[in-house]
Image: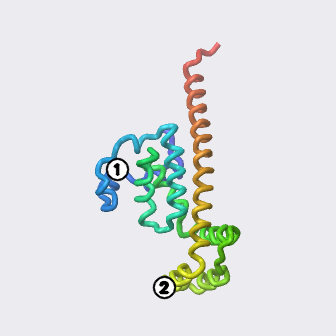
Amino acid sequence: MAERSRLARWASENMPRREDLAESRWIKPFGQRVLHSEFWRFTRRSVPRGVAVGLLVGIFLMIPGLQIVGAALMCVPVRGNIPLAALMTFLSNPLTTPFFLLAAIFVGNTMGFRADTGTFWSMYEHHAGVGAWLRWLLSDAAPSLITGLFVIAAVCAVIGYFLSIGIWRWWQVRKWRRRARRFMPEI
């Protein structure tokens, strides 16, 4: 049996299972709809949708506990793959969050909103508390940050959608070629 890659092992260990989501107090009100098998299959249509939803929710909604739940709930109307959407939310993690926030402020400032980046860096370097961050965010930074996060999340979702379509096709062609070689008689 072939050895699984480190990424495959990490994904299988961290990907939420149906049972985990069934126990979630946020998902329970939506009943069996989220737990339906069509949202847990890996098909050529559900995979890109799940990737796009996961990137959109994971980058825009920077609240770690709500990202997976939000991605799972958003997969229902678009018929996306819930495990992949949940996995894609891990793109925004404590290491990447400051970069996303800075990029969002830059994009928001470019679009005409104004947020003071000097204050951002000062609070980041001095490990400011949640209250200081909220005061800064509720000042003039909120429109810039929200607009920038939405633009970055939407662009990443579109790129992820088309990239996953390409990877899916490559994977299928590779699988069919391997299958054809296995059944082709040698001359």
Q: Is residue 127 above or below residue 72?
A: below
- Residue 10 visible to an observer of this rendering: no
Toward the front, the furthest residue is: 112
Instruction: Measuring from the top left, give residue 23's x and y in whole percent.
Output: 29, 57
Q: Tag 2's secondary structure? A: helix
- Identity of the residue drawn at 48% across and 52% down: 85
Residue 91 lies in quadrant: bottom right
Residue lying furthest top in this view? 187
Which of 55 and 178 lies nearest the eye of the viewer? 55
Between 94 and 57, the one lying in front of the other is 57
Three-letter amino acid code of the residue under disc 2: Gly
The amino acid pointed to by label 1 is: Arg
Q: Badge 1, how many Cα within 10 Å: few under 14, some, many 20+? A: some
Q: Position of residue 171 (x, y in %)?
A: 58, 37
Mark 1, residue position? 18
**Distance (Cα) linking label 1 and label 2:** 36 Å
Indicate the quadrant containing the C terminus: top left, top right, bottom left or bottom right: top right
Give the answer, above or below, for where 37 lies relative to 30: above
| Residue labelled with disc 2 | 131
Locate residue 58 relative to residue 109 in the image: left or right.
left
Relative side of 24 to 64, left or right: left
Q: Position of residue 49 (x, y in %)?
A: 51, 46
Which mark is on residue 74? none
Residue at (64% x, 72% y) in the render? 105
Q: Is residue 99 above or below residue 181?
A: below
How many marks can you see?
2
